[in-house]
Image (tube, coloured by chain):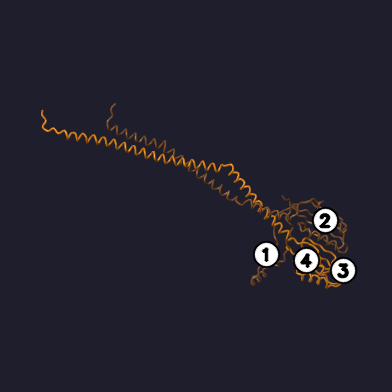
Chain colours: A brown, B orange
Amino acid sequence: MKISKREQSLLSFLLFLAVISFAYVFVIMPLQASIDARKSLNVTLNDQKSLIEAELMNGIGLDQKITEALDKVNLEFSLIESPISSEEFEQKLLPVLVINDIRIKSWIVNDPIISAPNLPTFEKLGYVYKLKELVDSYHGIYTSQSSIPVTDAELVLTNVNFSFTSSYNDYVEVLDAIVSWNSTVFVSTSSRDNLTGEAIISIDFYSIEKP
Amino acid sequence: MKKDNINLLENYLLTEKRRKNTSTKGLNFIAIFLITIILISAYGLKLFLEDQGLKDSNQQLNAYVTDPNIIKQVSDVAVKQRQLADLKEILNTIKSLNAAFDAMPELDSIVLDKINSCIPADTKITSIDYDGQWLTLKTVSTNYLRPSEFARSLRNTNFFEDTIYYGYEESSGKYVGTVLVALKVGK
């Protein structure tokens, strides 16, 4: 079959287009798609790497910070009593009572409960009424804020009540002994009849389980 | 028939020109074709190299982010950060507790001695009641002026947060007075 020059030119042009199309469809496009996918993955991986590096940067000096915080926590923990059994508590107080030959009449230990410290709340801030407020305001006097610390943190509270008969000096010695423990043991209520020498002391024993 | 003008050169030149034109067209086409192929190949090569570069980069990044050692380090840091946050919370809580305990009033000989130092003549404290902050003091005197003197002395010490005097009652010729004092919260 003989083809004319015009047909030759047309076929050549078609061949040319075919080659370009082939290259575009089977080489350029797949490569471009692959590059797009890899770029997207690259961005994701770079983000992950940045996050990891930031995390690792945050980790620098963390051990030191933990050690310091742990020391502070342990120091604060040491100021609070560890839980002890009721008999241990009795044994703790007993030497004071025995030395002074105090006659214990009753010793009642209540079940431990979870409670925030029973901190008294009374502060003399004066009476507050409108006219006083106006006068104070005129003089530039403003009601002072309470300085009593507030906490809603809870711990284990064991209440112990005991009654006894003793001299006034022995009663004071028992109170001093409890205060001298310099601990989280407080006399919550107490009463003494000076005529009969009968006294009741109620003790709040705050404790916390330590790691 | 005899030809008068036999000019072979003219014909030759004409033929040559046609041949040259045809030959140049073909060459032009081949040149354009080759240049296009070269350009496409160059572009393809550039894309291929870029693709390979990204592939290598991704492999390195992937190796980094999936490295068990790195993952362990990150995990360790996360654990330590949580521990530090927990410790800070524990510290804040326990500090608030200790601040509360520091502020707790305590009944001891210092308080009782201060009260005793205020007792006027001919007066005795018959009972002491303590509720954690308030002390209720019952006194008995032979003189009706003594209960108020006692209360005034207590107030003048400025040792107590507040002093409340509830007066007295006469009983069998003795005057039974009641005074309340509040211990200060905090040290």
| Residue at image coords 65%, 49% | B83
Q: Is residue B152 above or below residue B68?
A: below
Note whether residue A194 is visible: yes
| Residue at image coords 28%, 27% | A2
Q: Is residue A8 above or below residue B47?
A: above
Which chain does tag 1 point to?
A
- Cα–Cα gap, marks 1 and 2: 39 Å
Q: Describe the element under mark 3 as helix, strand or loop.
A: strand
- Residue B42: give x, y in percent of width and height: 39, 40
Residues under numbered marks 1 and 4 in contact, where contact means CB atoms less than 8 Å apart: no
Few, some or many residues within 10 Å of mark 2 (<14, 14–19, 20+): some
- Cα–Cα gap, marks 2 and 3: 39 Å
**Residue at which label 4 appears:** B181
**Which amino acid lies under the numbered mark 3 shown in the image of this protein?**
Ser
Please tell me which residue lies in front, B105 or B94: B94
Figure quadrant of residue B13: top left
**Which amino acid lies under the numbered mark 2 shown in the image of this protein?**
Leu
**Residue at which label 1 appears:** A145
**Residue at which label 2 appears:** A93
| Residue at image coords 34%, 34% | A15
